[in-house]
Image (cartoon, rainbow, N blue to C red):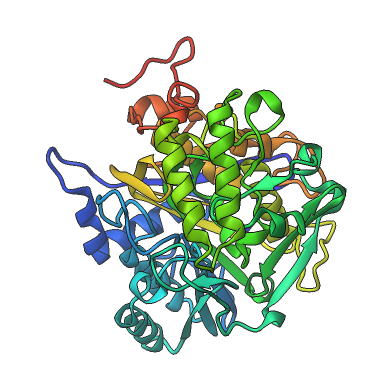
Amino acid sequence: MTDAPGATMTVGLSLAAREPGMDVAALYHRPGVLRALLRDAMAQGGVPKDEAESAFATIVPRDASVLVKPNWVNHFNPAGHGMDCVVTHPEFIAAVVEELATARPGRIVVADAPIQSCDWDTLVPQAFRERIIGLGARHGVAVEFRDFRKTVVHGRFLEAPVVRPPRPADRYALFDLGGDSLLEPLTTRLGFRAPDYDHRRLAEAHANGMHKYLICKEIFEADVVVSLPKLKVHKKAGITGAIKTLVGVNGDKDYLAHARAGGGSSGGDLYEGRSLSHEVVAWLRDRVNMHRGHLSRVPWLAGVFLARNLLRVDERLMDGNWYGNDTCWRMSLDLNRIASYGRADGSLADAPQRTIHTLTDAIVCGQGDAPLKPHPMAVGAVTYASNSVACEVANAALLGLDFRKLPIIREAFSAFRWPLVEPGAAVRIRSEGRDETFDELVSRLGNRADAPPAWHGYIEWEPPPGISRAA
């Protein structure tokens, strides 16, 4: 199910009934209510509704192979606010898998690529895996879990050894977008950077006329792709949800450009403006990353710690963590284009090869120092769309952010090769049987997420003339 070229793209929104003092997180533990929210969001989004069958009955052919891609980023929340606001909730995944299993596909693969230091067995415990596998078995459907990562660090310390997990190299497809990459206009001799990764490896993937990504083949082998993002603000992109979550189909973080070396005043976007103290810390951080996996990293870590404290550098405002980051959204849209147009041989077709169905876990969202250290925001919503960009417009509304101020959404409507939306396409948000514009929905809900530190005042929605904010 895809929207016609130039047509209005529909997003289905399902909002849980809220009562004063209600614990919204408790919705995760009410399977009937959770599945009803999923079904309603899909019905509002235009999927034919049949109470006797799965909500996926018209999307998933019998015996099809389905890829379910949650948002699995890390196994703990360093800020101490729990995991409900960090990753797609396990019960949300369970509800979707059960709904899928009743459509009788042949196989369901649940997979993602968390950060390299994530402990997989803590994030996706064996008991949970067995439960979901058993849930599928009750419907005669095989369920598999896969870790997409090519590189893993064992242990919590940054000098811990880097290992290669037993995922065969032939399970990845290498893409080179060349001059058609959205990163191409930014390519300079200073190069790109990614937190905790060696920039020399990144330079092997991104240079003038060369922009490579290493993509897991499961997305090309699936007959149906179902994306399950966790809705959060994001310190490098402003927001992470339907669009940013597809970065997880890239299996090697050494291919992911997050920012450009230097400050905003010198052609980079690691930090705002021009600052010698920030440049010193950035240089030391490069040395830390160049020695990753070795004890020789420790002295450089000590140097970063001393410089950061002596020069009073707030690392929350480093690494591209600010509103002027012009790199991260480009990388994210590149990966969305590959996910839509890519083929298993590393080529891109002229027409989309698959529809990505997105069900956003926006029951408890993440705000503040996200995506890794958020604190919770109770929203109680699920969104569905067959277009990731359209879905993200509605997701921005749920957070009280203006999608027109967020490059990762705004620029996705631009004209480029392998477009993500058709020219002239508009977004319609449908909830409770009625249609709303973006501004009407933000106004009605009245939500206002706590933006990341260096994004405050730059991405929040403000009422346009004729529309007032909800009390």
Q: Nearer the viewer, residue 307 or 395?
A: 307
Residue found 56% across the figure and 27% down from its top: 405
Q: Position of residue 438 (x, y in %)?
A: 49, 30
Q: Nearer the viewer, residue 387 or 366?
A: 366
Q: Position of residue 6 (x, y in %)?
A: 73, 39
Q: Position of residue 219 (x, y in %)?
A: 64, 70
Residue 60 position by quadrant: bottom right
> Is 66 displayed left or right of 138 in the figure?
right
Residue found 65% across the figure and 60% down from its top: 254
Q: Is residue 41 above or below residue 273?
A: below
> Is 61 displayed left or right of 412 in the figure?
left
Residue 416 visible here = yes
Q: Nearer the viewer, residue 137 or 54?
A: 137
Q: Position of residue 320 (x, y in %)?
A: 56, 38
Q: Is residue 411 above or below residue 51?
A: above
Q: Quadrant of the C terminus?
A: top left
Q: Is residue 218 above or below residue 242?
A: below
Q: Quadrant of the N terminus?
A: bottom right
As drawn, which residue projects farthest toward the top? 465
Residue found 48% across the figure and 55% down from its top: 299
Residue found 31% across the figure and 53% down from its top: 78
Residue 197 visible here = no
